[in-house]
Image (tube, rainbow, N blue to C red):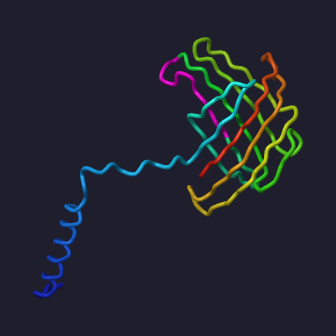
Amino acid sequence: MIFTSSCWRRLAGALALLATAGACTSKTSDPAPEVPLATTTWTVDGTATGTNDVRADATANGALSLVATARLSPTTSASIEHTVDLLLPGRVGTFALPAAARARYYTFDGATSRGQQYAATSGSVTISSYVAGPALGASHVVGTFAFATQAMPGSTGTPTIASGSFDVTF
């Protein structure tokens, strides 16, 4: 390929433009804060639980899987984890538990390495908004949940999960 002087001038102009674009950025301004892709909250027997990790996915049969975990003292091996695990129809609506959707609640105590597992016996999940996107990061689901539980084998107690909400992009 032969470069003419006009090609070199265009290339030099483009390089100069790129160089000035980087020089124009302000080093004193703070970057815009990241918008969280997921927020999930709930209470356990009236005690609020924050969320550190949320995973959501659409399953092959069109259902939605949402797993939210809150860790108390997440930087130590003695952390206590609270997890809500929901398997929901992939559409807007209110779904009775456990008939039309599945809800589970788990706890894990890192200090004792003991966990407790509970299944929903009654309650509901409402999906108020659901947009299924074609690619990762393009789907969005918003809703609420509340349910009573029963202990699964090897666990004790019957915690009540209330005031649950989720707003997740996945």
Asked whether, in this view, residue 137 is left or right of residue 164, the answer is left
Residue in the foreground of this view, choosing between 45 and 113: 45
Q: Which residues are magenta?
A: 67-77
Location of residue 143 with respect to 84 vertically, above or below = below
Quadrant of the image occupied by residue 122: top right
Q: Position of residue 161 (x, y in %)?
A: 76, 30
Location of residue 74 with respect to 90 vertically, above or below = above
Q: Which residue does the image show at 70% across and 57% down from the upper left?
A: 130
Q: Is residue 76 shown in magenta?
A: yes
Q: Position of residue 164 (x, y in %)?
A: 72, 38
Quadrant of the image occupied by residue 82: top right
Q: Which residue does the image show at 14% across and 76% down from the upper left?
A: 12
Q: Position of residue 14 (x, y in %)?
A: 20, 75
- Judged from this view, the residue extending furthest toward the top is 112
Q: Is residue 46 shown in magenta?
A: no
Asked whether, in this view, residue 7 is left or right of residue 32, the answer is left
Residue in the foreground of this view, choosing between 5 and 140: 140
Q: Which residue does the image show at 82% across and 27% down from the upper left?
A: 149
Q: Position of residue 123 (x, y in %)?
A: 85, 37
Location of residue 13 with respect to 143 vertically, above or below = below
